Amino acid sequence: MSRIIHKSGIPKPAVVAIGILIVLLVLFGGILGLAYARANSGKILSGVSAYGFDLGDKTEEQARAIMNQYKNDLNEKEFTLVFNKNKTKFVGKDIELKASSAVIDDAIAYGKSSNFFAQAQNVLKSFFGQKYDASEGKEITIDEDALKQKISTIISSSGDTAVDDTYEISGDVIIITKGHDGVAAKIDNVSKKIIESAKDATNPETIEIEATINKSQDIDIDWLYNLIHVEKANAEYTTGGEYVKERVGVSFNRAEAYAKYKTLEPDSTMKITIVREMPDVTTENLAQILFGDTLGSFKTNYVASNTNRSTNLRIAAENIDGKIFLPGEVFSYNKEVGERTAARGFREAHVYSGGEVVDGLGGGICQISSTLYNAVLLADLEIVERKNHMFWPEYVDPGFDATVQWGSIDFQFKNNRKSPIKIVASVKNGVASISIMGKKEENEPKISLRYNKLAEYEPTTIQRNDASIPAGTTKQIQSPVKGYKVEPIIVYKDAKTGAVIKEVKLPIDSYSPTNRIVAVGTKVVETPIPITPEPVVITQAPPVITPKPVVTSAPTRIKLTPVPAKTSQSYWPVGWDTPDNPGY
């Protein structure tokens, strides 16, 4: 039997593996060394190109020279555009035909990464023949606007440019000019062909322009109508009482315009006549139309010499004069007249307070509200709020007054008519006049006012001691006025025949009597005591006086005017109206 003897040491497979590893390390080191050498050789790696030019193994200077020459060739490359036998020529620089400037830098940088292993990888790729196009993704560019201008020139020279319809408004005429169809060049196709031909920068290129039919833009008659159309509108008043100017209607006959346009030949014209329609109501005749009728009018008298009270009446009237109220709007006396203050010009005048006549700021303005109340009733307007005085004011019939007080009592009415109303108020020469102006309806009745007296109340006399006048004398400081209970009535009559149509009874009003107030004097007048002179004792003889001669002449006549008899004193307060017309 033979014996197998194993030698000691490293097994054979391990030796082989170690040998292969050593070879690979040597090879890898050699590749790294080669990569380093190639990266620092100053030349571009093999297989690098740009725009079809081989830049491999070229120095940076050589590569730049090649690309600069290519750019120059692109600038001078000749192009000819052809359309319908018409031609136009230009060179690359006319449309800014350009190659990217970044390709050289990318080509040079390829294989020279700061990462040593990435650099080695690119070198290996180049070693084994892999190509790298530095111009990939960097297309040649042109100025599209400049190219469109070239194309437009050649197409327009052949007369095939589309022309849209146009219109012009001149005075009352619309002139429509019919255009014509044309052709539209396929700009994108031309750009694409130019860029493709740029690969050969030296040879001229002829490009046929492709085009499609370009329809001209028609005029839309409905659009044109809506453009100029204005609906006529009457002048009117706003809620603030301002004028809204009328609008003149503008239009044209659309059916006639359709027919003309349908048969209109290319490059020919047609005319459309503009029709203007005046509104029925203009700012000139609006006031006459809306406020030409007197719906209700009323007057009351006042004592013009009482300046304080007259001033208050005038201010109140001025604040409501000219006010316009549209249908449905409500008039408020306190709102329109405003607060009665001295700063606004109101003065102290007589008012009722606690059953007596006293001075108060704004006294007398109830005469304007009462005058307005009567005008409103005669205009057949709806009463919203109204209250009578406690005492009959006498400047209107009982039952037809309207008292007001700032912050508590108001007089309000509503315009329940179909058209606006306007208040016209004036105070002058002892007469307060108010009219409601508007537009009467057809067959509108005639209105009058009356009242039924239901009761009468006699005033009493109230005496008050007054230490300012002598005892035994009296002075009247307030005149008596009767009180009443009345039923106001509005009478409606046919305006043509005068026949009574109906009578409307208003709420019953009651007025307390105004009592007579008499001041009774309590002042005591003392009688002076006579003084008796003491006797005078003469102890010396008086001197003898010789009288001078008196020259006599005709006696002087003195005319004596008799003292007029004392007339009965009026006990109505100074500045107050007379009992016949107290004008509270």
Image: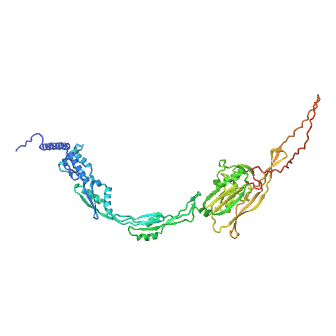
Percent across and percent down for residue 288 are 61, 63
- Residue 355 lies left or right of residue 529; in this view the side is left
Give the residue displayed 77% in from the left and 53% down from the top.
578
Q: Is residue 70 left or right of residue 430?
A: left
- Residue 252's x, y, as percent? 48, 67
Quarter of the rendering occupied by the N terminus:
top left
Q: How is the image coloured?
A: rainbow
Q: Is residue 559 above or below residue 90?
A: above
Specify the quadrant of the image occupied by residue 293: bottom right
**Residue 446 shows up from this direction:** yes
Horizontal and vertical percent position of residue 562? 86, 48
Of residues 40 and 570, the one drawn nearer to the viewer in this rendering: 570
Judge whether 539 appears above or below 349 on screen. Answer: above
Q: Residue at x 91, y 39 (%)?
A: 551
Considering depth in this image, is 213 or 516 the residue closer to the camera? 213
Left or right: 223 with respect to 336? left
Rendered image quadrant of residue 192: bottom left
Q: Residue at the far left: name it.
A: 1
Is 353 located above or below residue 22 in the figure?
A: below
Number of marks in picture: 0
Measured as percent of width and height from the top left, residue 278 is found at 54, 65
* Residue most extreme to the top: 539
Viewer-nearest residue: 170 or 470: 170
Q: Is residue 379 visible?
A: no
In the rendered view, would you say 212 is above or below 63? below
